[in-house]
Image (spheres, rainbow, N blue to C red):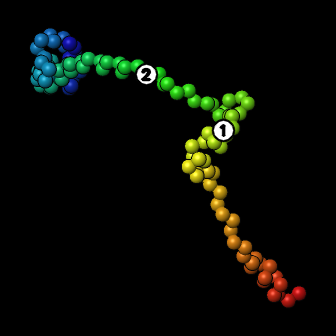
Amino acid sequence: MIVICTKCAARFRVADERIGPRGAKVRCSRCQTVFHVAGELPVAPAAPAPPPRPALDVELENPFAAGGAKARAPEDDPFAAAGFGPHVPPPLPARPDPFVAAAAAAPP
């Protein structure tokens, strides 16, 4: 392992056995500075690849395919059979238009 002094940037070769997993204190032979050298971190084994996903048993229709989606008959629709259909809000009650009433009351 090559170690570089933190003060004078001198380079030294140190045997890997001299530096443990927690690192070691090293004294520079040029400037006498003592500094810490980090040990090599153990390399974790690579995670295994996830298993392949199983194929689906259901084939879906593509509503964007050429020709458009097929219209379903109401008897084939389980939601329509249960009483659920497209939501259509009820019509709003008729109210007099305030602008028409104000225009009629205004002098000409």
Relative vertical location of residue 20 with respect to residue 102 in this rendering, above or below? above
For the N terminus, the image quarter is top left
Crowd tier of the residue under label 1, counting other residues whose Cα lies within 10 Å: few below 14, some 14–19, many 20 or above: few
Give whichever of 5, 79 is nearer the camera: 79
Crowd tier of the residue under label 2, counting other residues whose Cα lies within 10 Å: few below 14, some 14–19, many 20 or above: few
Q: Residue furthest right?
A: 108
Locate residue 38 relative to residue 63 in the image: left or right.
Answer: left
For the C terminus, the image quarter is bottom right
Q: Residue at x 75, y 78 (%)?
A: 96
Q: Residue at x 26, y 17 (%)?
A: 45
x%, y% of residue 61? 61, 30
Quickly name the residue at label 2.
54
Q: Mark 2 vs mark 1: which is more N-terminal? A: 2
Answer whether residue 63 is visible to the viewer in this image. Answer: yes
Cα gap from disc 2 to disc 1, whole angstroms: 29 Å
Give whichever of 7, 4 is nearer the camera: 4
* Secondary structure beneath label 2: loop
x%, y% of residue 85? 61, 50
Give whichever of 64, 73 is nearer the camera: 73
Q: Residue at x 68, y 68 (%)?
A: 92
Instruction: Give the numbered dot on residue 72.
Output: 1
Answer whether residue 31 is visible to the viewer in this image. Answer: no
Q: Residue furthest bottom?
A: 107
Which residue type does callout 2 highlight? Pro
x%, y% of residue 50? 36, 21
Which residue type does callout 1 highlight? Arg
Relative vertical location of residue 41 with respect to residue 14 in this rendering, above or below? below
Number of labels in the image equals 2
Give whichever of 85, 76 is nearer the camera: 76
* Secondary structure beneath label 1: loop
